[in-house]
Amino acid sequence: MIKLNINDEISRLRAVVLGTAVSNGPTPKLQDAYDPKSAEHIKAGTYPVEADMVKEMESVAAVFKKYGVTVYRPDVIKDYNQIFARDIAFVIEDKFIYGNILEDRSKEIDALDYVIDQIDDSKIIEFPEDAHIEGGDVMPWGDYIFVGTFKDKDYRKYITARTNMEAVVYLQEIFPHKKVVSFSLKKSNFDPRENALHLDCCFQPLGRGKAIIHKEGFLIEEEYEWLVNFFGKENCFHITKDEMYHMNSNIFSISPEVVISEKNFIRLNTWLRKEGFTVEEVPYAEIAKQEGLLRCSTMPLIRD
């Protein structure tokens, strides 16, 4: 059995699900794009090809192997995008929580049946049908759970709005001993530079008391300021709109001292090393064209 244990974003990683780009399928039709960045690359003829994405994901698998992390990969579904494992489920404490995601992506979780079969049934949670949630919006952080959401009444107009307030309320019910803090994110169906698809597209807590943040990803300035005050302004690395577009906040922590980052994030990686982090650089720019990066394609199961 897999003994789940996740209480934050940074403790030493022991087991993780890493998505797969194998049999990713052909370039989607424009009307089938889930996000504005994918749509941008479909229109431009620059949508990533499978061979390049497979290489990128294998570079991450190699880093996990280097650090002795147990890696689970989804069973391959023919011609189906299974890269972004973070969205379909997530772990908090010893609970495995199904994401309540876009219907077109519903088959992704089936490819993890062999993993879920190793988890105690009493630890598996499903959200009510009207409570929409994806793992990219959910960040356990000790006594807190940070959640990205979209509170406006026109929520259903946005394919980029993935977590609603019904889910935030239900999450608090499941974990009454934690403080669930929600953050309204900026959404756009058409402009990727004006769209924070998930919380991890504009914010991420790190080890050493640090955090990465993009102010303009938040709809409500007071909520952005709450995070800055929580971590301390001097500990926050503010990324630009262009850096958010390239997914600079979507790196991944193996431990409080070690992160995996995209090799082209020069300014961020320089700052991380200056702050004492070991930075394992990987190529991930092709996968980033789908508005997701390293955190998006991983689902941690066990941390110390």
Image (tube, rainbow, N blue to C red):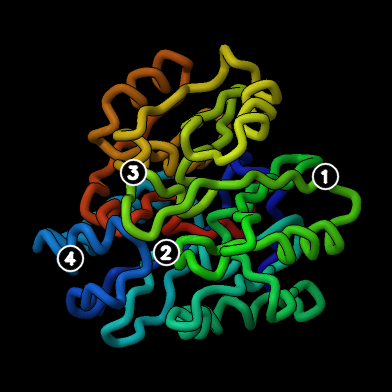
Task: Report the Cα–Cα distance between label 4 and label 2.
Answer: 18 Å
For the point 41% across and 13% down, which residue is it? 274
In this figure, which residue is indicated by the disc labeled 4? 42
Helix, strand or loop at label 4? It is helix
Work out which residue is located at the far right of the displayed protein and give it: 177
- Nearer the observer: mark 4 or 1; the answer is 4
Which residue type does callout 2 highlight? Phe
Q: Which of 282 and 204 is in front in this view?
A: 204
In this figure, which residue is indicated by the disc labeled 1? 179
- Give coordinates of residue 94: x percent, y percent: 76, 61
Q: Which of 172 and 152 is in front in this view?
A: 152
Which residue type does callout 1 highlight? Lys
- Give coordinates of residue 295: x percent, y percent: 46, 50
- Give coordinates of residue 139: x percent, y percent: 64, 48
Q: Residue 161 carries which label?
A: none
Lateral position of residue 94 relative to residue 90, left or right: right
In this figure, which residue is indicated by the disc labeled 3? 193
In the image, residue 100 sits, relative to residue 12, either above or below, namely: below
Task: Report the Cα–Cα distance between label 1 and label 2.
Answer: 27 Å
> Which is more N-terminal, label 1 or label 3?
1
Q: Residue 84 carries which label?
A: 2
Quadrant into which the N terminus falls: bottom right
Residue 153's quadrant in the figure? bottom right
| Residue 57 shows in the view | no
